[in-house]
Image (cartoon, rainbow, N blue to C red):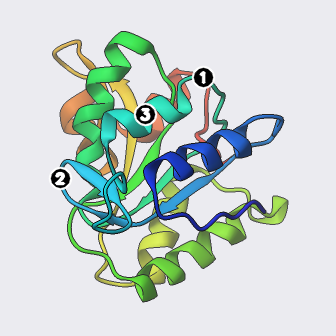
Amino acid sequence: MFHRSVELAADAQSAVSEWLNGNTNAQYCFIGTHGNTDLIGSSSQAGAFVSWDEVWSWFSPHRLLGGLWLGACKSSSAAEAFSRLLSTQGNVIPYFYGFAEEIYPPEIEAILGSLIEFSDADHLTDLASELNVLRSAVPGTKVELYYPAATRNGAARYVNFDRFEDEVGITFSEFLDRNGSRGTNR
């Protein structure tokens, strides 16, 4: 397990780069911080907050094999920015989890504990099942899964699991079957 505690955005970028460089099995990246609809960051210091576009740029030169976890309030807002970049830069982030509303440290810890269990080969699961387990870890907490797909109008975007069939036209499981993936967490 790789862990860094940082305050500034540049240090967070450096930690992500250090983790991805030379790590051929980089499965999960968890970024826990404060957030709003436009930015994430750790404090009111200058240089502490970054835009979703900047977070994307941290991953673009690397290969993330699994999901990105955004443990920040309103981190589901990243879907819009990531979708815009998906159409021009390709699938840099295979999928991500976020939160539509506020999320607090005790809730994050319970969900993160479940996520760590999934990294064990004995707990290999598909993403739909994983999402249900994570949601049950803290009832009432709305963790959201976003996965890249072409929508009904042809636009490639990160689609919320709960709206997948409405936006894509098939269920999430059908989409994974058709695309030769079971969406496992490895």
Q: Is residue 62 left or right of residue 49?
A: right
Query: Which amino acid, by three-letter code, is at mark 1?
Result: Pro
Density class for disc 1 (Cα within 10 Å; few <14, some 14-19, many ≥20) is: few
The residue pinned by badge 1 equals 61
Q: Is residue 33 left or right of residue 18?
A: left
Query: Which amino acid, by three-letter code, is at mark 3?
Result: Trp
The residue pinned by badge 2 equals 37
Query: Which amino acid, by three-letter code, is at mark 2?
Result: Thr
Residue at disc 1, secondary structure: loop
Res. 141 image quadrant = bottom left
User: Marks 2 and 1, how far apart in space?
Assistant: 25 Å
Mark sitting earlier along the chain (3/2):
2
Residue 106 position (above or below residue 79): below
Residue 60: x %, y % from top left: 53, 25
Q: Which of 10/105 is in front?
A: 10
The residue pinned by badge 3 equals 56
Residue 93: x %, y % from top left: 50, 33
Density class for disc 3 (Cα within 10 Å; few <14, some 14-19, many ≥20) is: some
Mark sitting earlier along the chain (2/1):
2
Residue 51: x %, y % from top left: 29, 42
Which residue: 49% across, 71% down?
A: 134
Mark sitting earlier along the chain (1/3):
3
